[in-house]
């Protein structure tokens, strides 16, 4: 079968070669085929495969606004508040233990609702954001409605973007100074963080004198690859290495030091990473404040989702709304439950010891 096919093809080919020998016109069909079909096909193939071989283009890293001006004062001066909580957060109350400000973004209403329905019931909590996307007006109308209903939104007129988080945190500090200067602590966190209010109480009680408190990351090299989410170009921060900073997923600032920190920030050029900027560059390096490490203010998400994994952490990071509600139900059950459930966790802790910390995954 195959042999006979080969025989036929070679015979046809020989006839064709003879044809070319006799008449040049016999060359036309193959040339036409080459030009019309093969050449565009090769062209298409080369264009597509070469794109796959080239490294991808670096993602857009919109850091250009920092080239124009890196003075925090400049950005604060040009940023107006658009929506504020309906009632004064601290008013005439003399002592306020904790104000929690959650970094959110306009479209993340579902995350905010999960926070409201869970841990925020136990803590004075507000959400801070800017303006988002191409349909700013529509988004703002939605946010107005949400603000009217819950009274816990703080919206400013800056562009809400990952590279503007330092400005967002600065606005949080500023707002706390304006509205609730008597607070003992400000807790800055994110809307995908689950807070355990009972452990948070313990953390606060054990650290009344702390200046800044959080999960200390030690001896970190900054990311110089443009592909990285935490990319910091050298022109923004010439130091390659940061000796200590507190993870931005959740850190506490003692209210007494807020004025000092905001004052010092005027002299420190902005950097896109808010935790490195405020906890390391401003608080630690410029002011010499102490950064206290507490492993319970965890930037980590347990991979092993049993109640006891959550019970002694003050914060757990990177949960979607559904995960947050599920984890909260476990936690609330545990905390409202009888003491012996807690004893089970104490035993769990004792048994697994430090393994438990290493068994957690970083996000
Ligand atoms: C940045 O803004 C500050 C405060 O508004 C201003 O004093 C300074 O001149 C500006 N710097 C540049 C480079 O424009
Ligand atoms: C940050 O906010 C400012 C003020 O709204 C804006 O000019 C700038 O473009 C924003 N940066 C990014 C990366 O969106
Ligand atoms: C960072 O250093 C501090 C002080 O030396 C230490 O207490 C803390 O455990 C360290 N952080 C981590 C994550 O190991």
Image (cartoon, grey):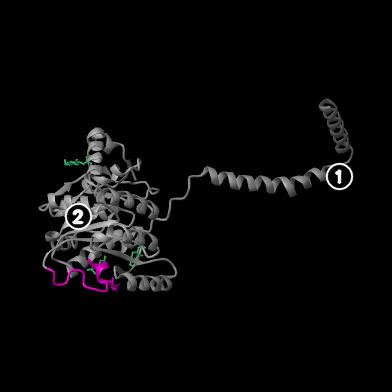
- Residue 47 seen in this snapshot: yes
Instruction: Return the residue at label 2.
Output: 252
Q: Quadrant of ligand 2?
A: bottom left
On the picture, is 11 further left or further right than 356? right
- Residue 71 seen in this snapshot: no
Mark linked to residue 168:
none
Instruction: Return the residue at label 1.
Output: 25
**Residue 227 in magenta?**
no
On the image, the x and y values in percent for residue 210 come to 12, 52
On the image, the x and y values in percent for residue 299 come to 28, 47
Which quadrant would residue 342 be assigned to in this image?
top left
Which quadrant would residue 86 be assigned to in this image?
bottom left
Q: Is residue 136 above or below residue 231?
A: below
The region drawn magenta spans 73-93
Lower position in the chain sequence, tag 1 or tag 2 = 1
**Outermost residue, top side:** 3
The secondary structure that most of the magenta stretch takes on is: loop
On the image, the x and y values in percent for residue 116 come to 31, 61
Disc 1 and disc 2 in contact, CB within 8 angstroms = no
Disc 2 crowd rating (10 Å Cα; few below 14, some 14-19, many 20+) is many
Label total for image: 2
């Amino acid at each position: 079968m195959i042999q006979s096919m080969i025989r036929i093809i070679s015979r046809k080919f020989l006839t064709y070669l003879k044809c070319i020998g006799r008449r040049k016109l016999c060359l036309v069909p193959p040339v036409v085929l080459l030009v019309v079909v093969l050449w565009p096909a090769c062209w298409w193939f080369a264009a597509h495969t070469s794109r796959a071989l080239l490294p991808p283009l670096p993602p857009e890293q919109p850091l250009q606004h920092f080239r124009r001006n890196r003075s925090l004062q400049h950005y604060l001066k040009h940023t107006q508040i658009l929506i504020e909580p309906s009632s004064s957060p601290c008013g005439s109350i003399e002592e306020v233990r904790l104000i929690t400000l959650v970094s959110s973004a306009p479209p993340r209403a579902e995350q905010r609702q999960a926070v409201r329905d869970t841990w925020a019931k136990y803590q004075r909590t507000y959400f801070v954001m800017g303006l988002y996307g191409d349909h700013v007006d529509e988004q703002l109308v939605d946010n107005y409605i949400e603000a009217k209903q819950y009274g816990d939104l703080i919206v400013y007129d800056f562009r809400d973007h990952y590279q503007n988080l330092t400005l967002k945190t600065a606005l949080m500090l500023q707002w706390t100074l304006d509205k609730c200067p008597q607070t003992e602590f400000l807790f800055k966190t994110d809307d995908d963080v689950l807070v355990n209010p009972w452990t948070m109480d313990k953390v606060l009680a054990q650290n009344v004198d702390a200046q800044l408190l959080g999960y200390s990351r030690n001896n970190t090299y900054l990311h110089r690859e443009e592909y990285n989410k935490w990319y910091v170009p050298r022109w923004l921060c010439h130091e390659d290495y940061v000796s200590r900073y507190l993870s931005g997923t959740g850190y506490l600032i003692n209210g007494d030091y807020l004025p000092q920190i905001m004052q010092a920030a005027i002299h420190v050029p902005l950097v896109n990473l808010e935790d490195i900027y405020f906890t390391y560059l401003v608080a630690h390096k410029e002011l010499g404040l102490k950064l206290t490490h507490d492993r319970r203010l965890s930037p980590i998400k347990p991979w092993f989702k049993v109640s006891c994994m959550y019970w002694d952490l003050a914060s757990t990071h990177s949960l979607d709304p559904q995960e947050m509600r599920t984890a909260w139900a476990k936690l609330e059950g545990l905390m409202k439950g009888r003491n012996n459930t807690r004893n089970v966790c104490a035993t769990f802790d004792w048994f697994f010891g430090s393994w438990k910390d290493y068994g957690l995954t970083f996000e």
